Image (spheres, helix red, strand yellow):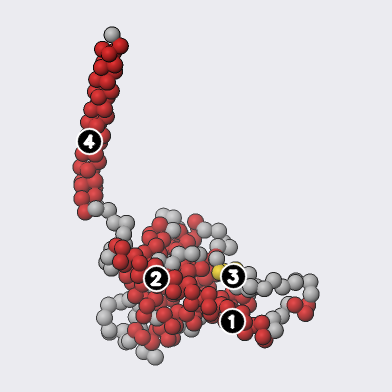
Amino acid sequence: MTERTFRPYDPDQMLLLPPSLKEWLSTDHLVYFVEELIGNLDLDDILSSYGGPARGTVPYDPRMLTAVLIYGYCTGVFSSRNMARKLEEDVAFRVLAANQRPDFRTISYFRKAHLPALSGLFVQVLRLCRAAGLVKLGHVALDGTKIKANASKHKAMSYERMGKEEARLKQEVDALLRQAEELDRQEDAEYGANRRGDELPKELAFREGRLKKIREAKETLEREAKEEAEAQKREREAGKRKAA
C-alpha cells in the first residue's frame, strides 16, 4: 500500500498553557480507552483510499476521525455538526482529536466515504471492549445477558450465544450509523449543506459590529423602558382624574 501523508496527529502533544489538555481529564476517562483501541485497529481499508503522498491537500489523519466518530456515537453524539461543536468546546473530544478541529462537512464526508469500513471497525471496538471486561462503552451495552460471576460454567460464552451477541452488536452499530446519517440529512435540510446552524449573523461576527449592535440594543431597551414608564404615568393620572 502506498503511504499517504496526513496532518500531524499526536494526542500526547504538549501545549504551553496548560502543559497538556489531558490534565483536565481524570486518568480513567473513557476517551483514553478509545484512543488506545483505535491505535490497535487495522485501518488499511480506509488508508488505501487516500492514494499517494503527492495527491491533493494534506488530509486529517483517519485514526483521529475514526476515534472521534466512534467516541461520539458511543456517548450519544450523532450529528456531524454537534461533533464539530464538541471539538471546539468539549475537553474530551479535544483531547481525542489532539486539539484538531475538522469541520462538520469533513466529519460527515469521512463517515459517508468509509461507511462499510467504519461499521466493521466499530464492531471490532465493541468486541475488544467486551473481551477486555467492559459491560458498556459509553451508552452502548456490550453484553445483553447478565453473567453470574461466582459460577464458572457461566463465565465463558457458548458459541451459540457469542454468535447472537455478535449479531446484536452489528445491529446496534448499524442503527447508530443510520441515526447519524439521518440527523445529518435533517440538519442539511434545515440549515443548508454548508452551514453549521449556530453561526452568528454577519453583523455580529466581529467585535466592532457586536459592540455597535449591543449599543443599539441597549438604546432600544432604554427607550422602550422610558416609553413604558410614561405610559404607566399617564394611566395613573387618568385614574386619579376619574376618581376625582
Read off the residue under disc 4.
220
How packed mark 2 is, by other alpha carbons closer than 10 Å (few <14, some 14-19, many 20 or more), is: some
Residue toward you, 175 or 123: 175
Q: Is residue 128 left or right of residue 199?
A: right
> For the point 47% across and 80% down, which residue is it?
119
Mark 4 residue element: helix
Q: CA distance from mark 4 to mark 3?
A: 53 Å
Residue 165 locus on image (x, y percent): 61, 79
Mark closest to the chain's N terminus, 1 or 2 = 1
Mark 1 residue element: helix
Mark closest to the chain's N terminus, 4 or 1 = 1
Nearer the camera: disc 4 or disc 2:
2
Three-letter residue code for mark 2: Glu
Residue 2 in sight from this viewpoint: yes
Q: CA distance from mark 1 to mark 2?
A: 24 Å
Nearer the camera: disc 1 or disc 2:
2
Q: Is residue 227 positioned above or below 17 on the image?
A: above
Mark closest to the chain's N terminus, 4 or 2 = 2
Q: Which mark is residue 166?
A: 1
Q: CA distance from mark 4 to mark 1?
A: 62 Å
Residue 228 locus on image (x, y percent): 26, 27
Residue 95 in sight from this viewpoint: no
* Viewport quadrant of the N terminus: bottom left
Q: Are marks 1 and 3 in contact (CB under 8 Å)?
A: no
* Viewport quadrant of the C terminus: top left
Read off the residue under disc 3.
141
Mark 3 residue element: strand
Read off the residue under disc 2.
182
Identify the image quadrant of residue 128.
Answer: bottom right
Q: CA distance from mark 4 to mark 2?
A: 42 Å
Mark 2 residue element: helix
